[in-house]
Amino acid sequence: MIAVEPFVCNAFAQNTYIVYDEDRKEAFAVDAGMYEEAERLAFDRFLKQRQLTLKFLINTHLHLDHIFGNRFVADRYGVPLYYAKEDEFLLNDFASQAAAFGLQVGAEHLPPVSENSFSDGFSVAFADSEIKTISTPGHSPGSVLVYFPSEKLLFSGDTLFRGGVGRTDLPGGNTAQLKESLKMMTSTFDDNVKIFPGHGLATTLTFEKKYNPFLV
């Protein structure tokens, strides 16, 4: 059985997710926003309590609130980190981004550069199925959806929220691209797909098509 465990992290109330197979005792993470030590401990405790082996981490994009915990995941679990290469420029500006928001970052926060970056989509095996990424530029150049087709689970990062969409006034943001990405989402996915956004509550495409002013 596949389950999803959310963790609300850091000052931006970012959603970090552990997706796991209860039978196989395997898991992967979507985004890693753990800034405080207590957040890192909660993430680690969940894996230990359920005896889960973390297999990999996928980032929906590389804004700082989604990658505070990348270093911890890489060092603690030694798993591959996957993200779109188009966002890699944001890693070079990590410290100044944090300073702009009045946040102090130490060595435990500094995100590693991954050897597993990708462009134009990516897939990785998990639980007799596969996890796919789908490019959705707009919020950032390298924003992607993380899709689990067999379970109809969609992790939208900051592309789509319950009742809203991601901002486009940050470096690399593009409103026209975001509109095209949203249009692609509404025409590609089943209305009943369950959406887990980067911030806020889970939703469905049915709900968003009816109530989200950016999709109506």
Image (tube, rainbow, N blue to C red):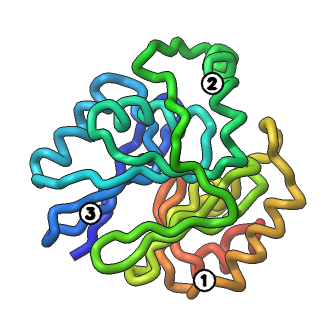
Q: Position of residue 209 (x, y in %)?
A: 67, 79
What residue do we see at 63% from left, 59% from top? 144
Q: Position of residue 210 (x, y in %)?
A: 66, 79
Residue 189's disc is: 1
Report the side of 177 relative to 36 (left or right): right
Residue 170's place in the image compared with 216, above or below, is above
The number of numbered badges drawn on the structure is 3
Which residue in the structure is indicated by mark 2?
94
In which quadrant is the N terminus drawn?
bottom left
Residue 20's disc is: 3
Report the side of 216 relative to 189 (left or right): right
Type of residue at label 1?
A: Phe
What residue do we see at 68% from left, 75% from top? 185
Q: Position of residue 110 (x, y in %)?
A: 50, 23
What residue do we see at 69% from left, 24% from top? 93
Q: Residue furthest front?
A: 115
Q: Residue furthest right?
A: 176
Q: Dot 2, how many residues are within 10 Å of its Cα: few (below 14), some (14-19), or many (20+)?
A: some
